[in-house]
Image (tube, helix red, strand yellow):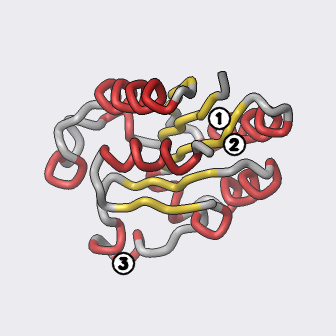
Amino acid sequence: MKKILVLNGPNLNLLGTREPEQYGRDTLADVERLCQEAGAKHGVEIECRQSNHEGVLIDWIHEAGREVAAGHMLGVVMNPGAYTHTSIALHDAIKGASVPLIELHISNVHAREEFRHHSYISPAARGIIVGLGVKGYVLAIAALVP
């Protein structure tokens, strides 16, 4: 069974308690359960990981690139959190690993503060889903399934 890696970046471990007016009340565990259900529906294995550390996320993207190249993985769904707006290194990792990646944001970043309007990830992503809440994860998983 092919796999999709779901990566959540900094502060997403605080889902459910951090700014619920922006991100809702679903916890990271709720999101991961939703992703597992979506994977089961599409017949793919879902692996969920979260880190607050940029280098760890980069290592996981490199690993995913190797798995995609070996034919074991379809791609990555990633909510890069605030690294969206700051990390050229994540952009370079996605491009360098040649990994199909869907960039995902729970909130509509374009309706928020100006500094959130720019993404270093988007130019390297296959697609982008923003502002649809945690249901965006389900759509992102579906987007990677052939």
Question: In what quadrant of the picture does the N terminus appear?
Answer: top right
Q: Is residue 39 left or right of residue 28?
A: right
Residue at mark 2: 58
Q: Position of residue 141 (x, y in %)?
A: 49, 42
Q: Nearer the viewer, residue 53 or 47?
A: 47
**Measuring 55% from the left and 62% from the top, which residue is drawn there?**
127
Q: Is residue 4 left or right of residue 22?
A: right
Residue at mark 3: 114
Q: Looking at the picture, which amino acid does disc 1 mark?
A: Val
Residue at mark 1: 56
Q: Earlier in the sequence, mark 3 or mark 2?
A: 2
Q: Nearer the viewer, residue 114 or 127?
A: 127
User: Which quarter of the figure has residue 92?
Assistant: bottom right
Distance CA(mark 3)–CA(mark 1): 27 Å
* Label 1 Cα crowd, 10 Å radius (few <14 / some 14-19 / many 20+): few
Q: Nearer the viewer, residue 115 or 60?
A: 60
**Measuring 65% from the left and 42% from the top, which residue is drawn there?**
75
Distance CA(mark 3)–CA(mark 2): 26 Å
Q: Is residue 90 above or below residue 15?
A: below
Q: Secondary structure at mark 1?
A: helix
Q: Looking at the picture, which amino acid does disc 2 mark?
A: Ile
User: Which quarter of the figure has residue 72?
Assistant: top right
Q: Is residue 131 left or right of residue 52?
A: left
Question: In what quadrant of the picture does the C terminus appear?
Answer: top right
Q: Secondary structure at mark 3?
A: helix
**Measuring 31% from the left and 35% from the top, which residue is drawn there?**
14
Contact, CB < 8 Å: mark 1 with mark 2?
yes
Q: Earlier in the sequence, mark 3 or mark 1?
A: 1
Q: Position of residue 17 (x, y in %)?
A: 20, 36
Q: Is residue 138 above or below residue 94?
A: above
Q: Position of residue 129 (x, y in %)?
A: 43, 59
